[in-house]
Amino acid sequence: MFDRKSLEVYVLLAATFVGALVTANVAANLISSKIVMLGGLVVPAGVLAYSITFAVTDTVCEIWGRRATQALVNAGFVVLLLVWALVSLAVAVPAAPFWDNQQAYAGVLGSAPRIILASLAAYALSQTLDVFQFQWLKERFGGRHLWLRNNASTLVSQTVDATVFVTLAFYGEYPILPLIAGQLVVKYVIALVDTPIVYALIYLVRLRLPPESAPAA
């Protein structure tokens, strides 16, 4: 499936995907669950980093198809589990007697099970839906209309992601409708803005790959 050049590019995109994914979760989904204001909208702090992942999955799906993209999504899920496990272990291990920052350390990095569950559920549902819908539209349109496939799949999957995560993570603690609305507006804007970025990524990837490894859209 991958020759050497294809594998190099795929690994680079995979690293970008996982890096953005972990950054989004570290920034927003720890126990502190930082909420920020963007243009008057209330959103979790990781919304910008997380939006990058959808541009990457659309690029990978366009070049290599659903199986390679779903493998990337599955790998991201495993990485999230590993991150939460290692961070929880680091918090739980007894501190040295002379080190007195345990409370602050645990306050910043300690993970609330509810936030973890919400993050994992939203991730699994939204990313899998994004991959499925993008590939379905690609087959339906015969590889044409990338702008439509990119926006339709991302808008629907981001809606699912915001609704599932905010509801599971914050229901009963914060007013969830403003959080969902804020996330959706920001994510919709990012989805529209990232379309030329997806075009550029696909163009650059195809320049790097041999013709037989980069089928035409």
Image (cartoon, rainbow, N blue to C red):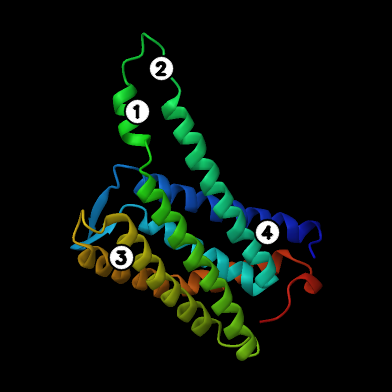
Q: Which is more N-terminal, label 2 or label 4?
A: 4
Query: Which residue does the numbered mark 4 point to in the structure image?
Result: 10
Q: Residues within 10 Å of mark 1 (few under 14, many from 20)?
A: few
In the rendered view of the protein, which quadrant contains the C terminus? bottom right
Query: Which residue does the numbered mark 1 point to in the structure image?
Result: 105
The residues tagged by marks 4 and 2 sit, at their Cα atoms, a distance apart of 40 Å
Which of discs 3 and 2 lies nearer the camera? The answer is 2
Tell me the tag on residue 21: none
Q: Residue at x 63, y 74 (%)?
A: 62
Q: Which is more N-terminal, label 2 or label 3?
A: 2
Q: Residue at x 55, y 74 (%)?
A: 199
Question: Compared with residue 160, is residue 122 higher up or lower down, i.e. above or below?
Answer: above
Tell me the tag on residue 95: 2
| Residue type, label 3 | Gln
Q: Which is more N-terminal, label 2 or label 1?
A: 2
| Residue type, label 2 | Ala
The residues tagged by marks 1 and 2 sit, at their Cα atoms, a distance apart of 10 Å
Question: Compared with residue 166, is residue 147 higher up or lower down, i.e. above or below?
Answer: below
Q: Residue at x 41, y 44 (%)?
A: 26
Question: Compared with residue 121, is residue 191 higher up or lower down, i.e. above or below?
Answer: below
Please say if the residues under marks 1 and 2 sit with CB atoms less than 8 Å apart.
yes
Mark 2 element type: loop
Q: Which is more N-terminal, label 3 or label 1?
A: 1
Q: Which is more N-terminal, label 4 or label 3?
A: 4
Please say if the residues under marks 3 and 4 sit with CB atoms less than 8 Å apart.
no
Which of discs 1 and 4 lies nearer the camera? The answer is 1
Query: Which residue does the numbered mark 3 point to in the structure image?
Result: 183
Q: Position of residue 76 (x, y in %)?
A: 56, 54
Mark 1 element type: helix
Which of discs 3 and 4 lies nearer the camera? The answer is 3
